[in-house]
Amino acid sequence: MGILNQSPEIIHEQNNTAANTRKTHAQERWQAILRYKQDFLQNNAEDPCQYPFMNQDVAASWVRSRNMGVNPYSVVTSSNMNPEKLSEILGKHHLLIKVTNSMVETFKDMLLSCGDILYLFDKTGVVLLNEGCWEKTHLFPENHPRMGIIADENSEGTTAHELCIRLGRPVQLLGPEHYCVAFQNCVASAAPIRDENGEINAALVLLNQPLLEPPGEEILENLCLHSLGLVTSLAIAIETHFKLVKATNDFCDASEKAETFNCHLQIAMDRFATVHNTLNTTLTLVDEGIVVTNRTGKIIHINQEGMRILRLRTEEMDSRNINDFLSSDSSIMTLAEKGENLTVEEFVCAGSDRQLYQICIRPAFNPYTQKLDIVVFKFNSSEKITAQLNTKAGGVASNTFENIVGENSEFKKSIAMARRFAGSGENILLIGESGTGKELFAQAIHNVHRPQGPFVAVNCAAMPRELIESEMFGYEGGSFTGAERSGRPGKIELAHGGTLFLDEIGDMPIELQAVLLRTLEDKQVMRLGGRRYKKVDFRLVTATNKNLYKMVTENQFREDLFFRLAVLPVNIPPLRDRGSDIENLSKFFIENYCQKKGWKVPQISSAAQKKINEYEWPGNARQLQNAMIYTVNTSLDGIIKPDNLPSYILLATCPIKIDGMSATSSEAIGEMLCLEKLEKAAIETALLHANNCVPVAAEILGISRSTLYRKLKEYNIEY
């Protein structure tokens, strides 16, 4: 969390202080520093030291990096130094690299199963060693080591190892504190390694896999605590072992050598114990199950979450095999023997419980015999993975019934009915024109019935016909060309434990309606290319702007599905039938938009409000909101006048009368009568009534499609 520790001796004390800060400010600091960084990089802010939450050493490094012309959007991925010089540096640090390799080898499979990267830098910023890689990222080429590159402040700006070496103490950088944008979702922890003279010789860095944004409070807190503690303990152990080997090589006197060796050996053993305890503590903070087995599957290490998943007691661990908890046709040990790093889905059987887990397989081979030595497994429940995918995809319902604005009696009846239906758990069908707020109602229903679960919204009209089946039901890896290797859950599967909202349900292909009906009846789904059904539990809310019953009579929609969906129908009235709500909503949208922008709220003149009230609003509340945004951006003197309204409103509410025209309004009407403006307004109005369908709009205007396409390009009209 931007922690710059004073010395190894007071790490524990400062970690406690930092933990208290994290509990209060973790996400707030992350977001605040991210904003400061954008301001610093994009707006050339002068003094980042004045920002709240900003560490002064980090701020000073930002300034130095900018003054040196460091590109914040670039990262060094290949060696940028002379081969002869690199060979000289590697030779100079040969012993340190060898010691670090031997120390890290014991723990790296367990440590790096989380997808982190461990670096060793010399004091000039040259990468001497790196272990691990990030999955599914294009930041660094796959399996491309960064060894031999210079990653100092001149090339990558503010980094944990640069500050660690400069300040001579352990350092931890919170994502956006890095100068390089590529690392702004990572937490980096660095600790110094000193030589026998007490001079800083190198820095050890643990770079965590990029986090989802925004990071969870508890995840971020645990990550920062154990990362800094682990890398500091490991650095001390490496430093001690390095001094031990160096001393053994340097001393010539046998007795003195033996005495020194024993002394340093005891220190090294103590440090090894520290590292071991730190590692065990680290694994207790990891919220995934970590299980380590030998080549036959016998469990040799397991963390607390792993014991909970397998329902193991401590005394049972030494006598159990991972195969005891897997189905008879499980292939994970076979896959491990092939040396592949894979992620598969398997059922885990613990007692009478049988649950689906996503299992990451990380085998490690003996470097001498080239045979499988150990296997590290990481267990994630499929429900947890689904929740993470939903969070990343933005599957969140942010609106409640309190957010729905309207005083019209019919509209309030619709709200009351939807609120009453929300608690029943039955399928709800929302019926209303486009723009009436059907998704707003769906989110509000979700937040009454299943607020803790995911909210998955699908627009059936916007989804390509050839992709809708795989998007809805998911697919197994290798099901078709271009499919992800590990497969992908569908929208129905992602909605497990929450709400599935199918908008424009009338546009769902009729051949898929039967599959959806079967899913609703059985509450289970099978992915494309799959061989087993998976149980799903979700609340279904659908919406349409079409007459579904008429579609049923015309054989365009399945009758059995219609009655399954329309258990509890809710009709949402159009805006034009809501009377005074038009005026209330227009003011609400203007105030809300101005608050977001930090602008003064303009007043609506009575003449402008009259025209707003008289307009039919075929696009309903969505169209009204967009129109009010337009009026705010065109009003310059704090008053919204009729000429600030979009032209289609003026044309629809101002019948042109030449006779009796007053002198004061002749100029305005003359401007309105401009043929180009009339033609453009007519096209915009036709598109609005045609729901942006060009063929229908051309038919309304009485012109050919090619003519309309030419006019759209001529007037720069988006559709």
Image (tube, helix red, strand yellow):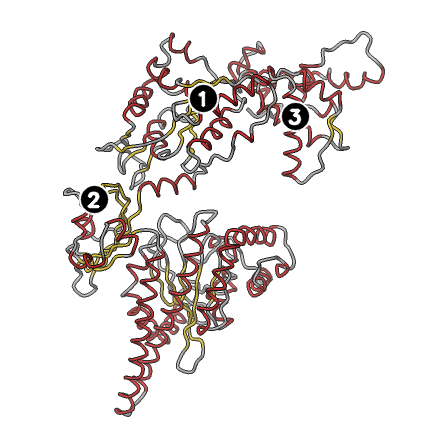
Q: In the picture, residue 655 is in which quadrant? A: top right
Q: Residue at x 35, y 50 (%)?
A: 135
Q: Residue at x 24, y 32 (%)?
A: 533
Looking at the picture, does residue 377 appear above or below residue 677?
below
Would you name the residue on which mark 3 appears? 586
**Residue placed farthest to the right in the image?**
663
Would you name the residue on which mark 2 appears? 349
The answer for how far apart the CA atoms under marks 1 and 3 are is 25 Å
Would you name the residue on which mark 1 appears? 543
Say few, some or many: other residues with alpha carbon within 10 Å of mark 2 (under 14 / 14 to 19 / 20 or more): some
Mark toward the viewer: 2 or 3: 2
The answer for how far apart the CA atoms under marks 2 and 3 are is 58 Å
Q: Give me the disc on residue 594.
A: none
Give whichever of discs 1 and 3 has the lower sequence position: 1
Give whichever of discs 2 and 3 has the lower sequence position: 2
Q: Quadrant of the C terminus?
A: top right
